Amino acid sequence: MNKILSKEENNHQWDRPLEFVLSLISNSVGLGNVWRFPYLAAQNGGGAFLIPYFLLYFLIGAPLYYMELALGQFTSRGPASGFVLARGWQGVGFAMIINSVLGTLYYNVIIAWALFYFVLSFRKTLLWSDCGHWWNSNRCFVPGFQGNTSTGNDTTLNCTALLASNLSNFTCPPTNNTKDVPATEEFFYRLLLNKSSSFDDFGVPGTYMSVLLLGAWIIICLCIFRGVQSSGKVAYFTAIFPYIVLLILIIFTATLEGAGKGIRYYIVPRWKLIGNFQIWQAAASQVFFSLSISFGSLIAYSAANDFHNKFFQQMCIVVCCDCFTGVFAGFAVFATVGFLATSLGREVEEYAQSSGPGLAFITYPEALSKMPASPFFSIIFFLMLLALGLGSQVLTISNLIGAAPLSIKAAGGFPDYEFPRWSVILGWFIFVFCILPIPLVFIISYIREYRRLSALQTTTGILGDNSQLTEYKEPKPIYLQALTANNSPADTWGPRRRKHQKDAYAHLAVRSAKTNIPSQQQFPEQSSKEMNHTDTQTGVINPTFDEGSAMHDDDGNTSHEKL
């Protein structure tokens, strides 16, 4: 039995500190840096977005990141049981878990998109590099291809339906369209997403996307089947490989026509936009999303650290890598945005702000299609996206295992669409469901504490009347006493492992010995009060949601001591 417990304990320990650092990098440096950061910067003024992002990142994001790591390493517990530092606020940990559940539901869809591109990259010619396919419309064109011409009366001559090898026999049929659409954009919206014309028309799930989504879940399960030890081994690849690919992509995109315009839009701030609250709001959401704050994964993985691990330098390395990666990837995206805007004859700002969440899946494939040996680089790039997505998702899944009106404008593919009332109500229901555990647990804990203090005052009231006190001080009202107690640490607050329960937390070791009671069949003389882990000081059962964490010590040895 001790060997089994010891093996289970070892599965929740890092083999070496380097694996912990690389796992944190994989968790923080993910699709949020390569996919989400560029499109938020594009929609919020480019350089004007970077200033509030940097300020919020280091003034709010980094301290909260440090706090979550400290909480997990000190308690050696996950988010659900780690927030007993204030017994009324344990619902924060439960809210983190719910936040992770909802996040993984859509995060894996992005991984399935990358898997779709990755599978279709094993071709001699990339499918999104030209028009003429069944999903293309007569507005399709290939940026940078000289066969695309335009007349002066808004009539586009679509000359990209044929490959360059057949240019000797091609004609240019006129089409009455005023807006051209790049082939990569049509590939994303018309083939991958099969986007409908209206939000009310949901359609049916695509067969190939459903299979790829299932495949993404299977890959994640294979990565975490052995606990944090196998996750740490995966992190060697998922944390280092993306930087090599991004460097190659940035060097190539810098040579495209119009790349300088895109980069200038990216790094030069528009000072008049700095005071826009929407930009600050978007920057704050990106900071939390990028650093994985409030998802619980940081607490869960730092809980597998050594109790005396000095993680401040490790935290600084991870935070700097995460911030650098997002800004670094933005150069590749905005260089391609400048190229696409130049090819379309549009302003960079206009094209960037009209793009949605699919910007990265349009700009990156466009740049890849222009590179020599494009299938090879496409395979490498989307393998990198898979590595980034899987690195973050593996840690989140591992953690799960161990004021707006009713008419809101959509912010993605339907900027002019007004959501129906039922969809907005559903969105608010999901939002309330996420934060409900925080007030609910607080109220339940407060009621329990209030009832305990009321009963205690009733039993001690006679003594108070008969005692002769020279100085009588009126006690605080019960509701204030209960509120104070509800915001104070629980009796079980402190390190979980017994060898760390020293000095100010020595009482936990005594409590652990008292709670390690054999069964009633062996000791029938023990009272039910002792079997229920009663607090000897207050005379009531501990109302926290602790999971009996002190039933065995750090080495997996269960102690059986008589009281």
Image (cartoon, grey):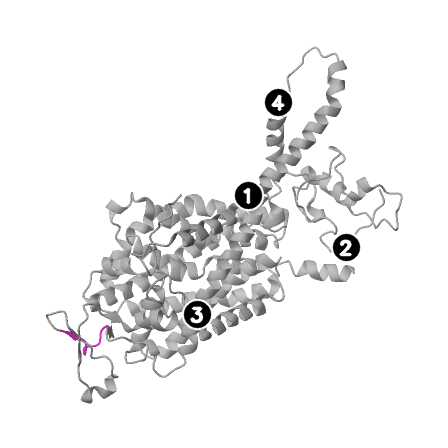
Which three-letter amino acid code belongs to the residue tagged 1? Ile
Residue positioned 43% across, 77% down in the render: 119
Q: Which mark is residue 438?
A: 1
Q: Looking at the image, is mark 1 or mark 4 earlier in the sequence?
A: 1
Three-letter amino acid code at the position of disc 2: Asn
| Disc 3 and disc 4 in contact, CB within 8 angstroms | no
Residue pointed to by mark 4:
476
In the rendered image, which residue does mark 2 sit on? 557
Which badge, 3 or 4, is on the more N-terminal residue? 3
Q: Residues within 10 Å of mark 4 (few under 14, many from 20)?
A: few
Q: Position of residue 488 (x, y in %)?
A: 61, 35
Q: Which mark is residue 204?
A: 3
Asked if marks 3 and 1 touch (Cβ < 8 Å), the reply is no
Distance from label 2 to label 1 (Cα)? 35 Å
Mark-to-mark CA distance, 3 and 1: 36 Å
Residue 79 x/y as whole percent: 59, 49
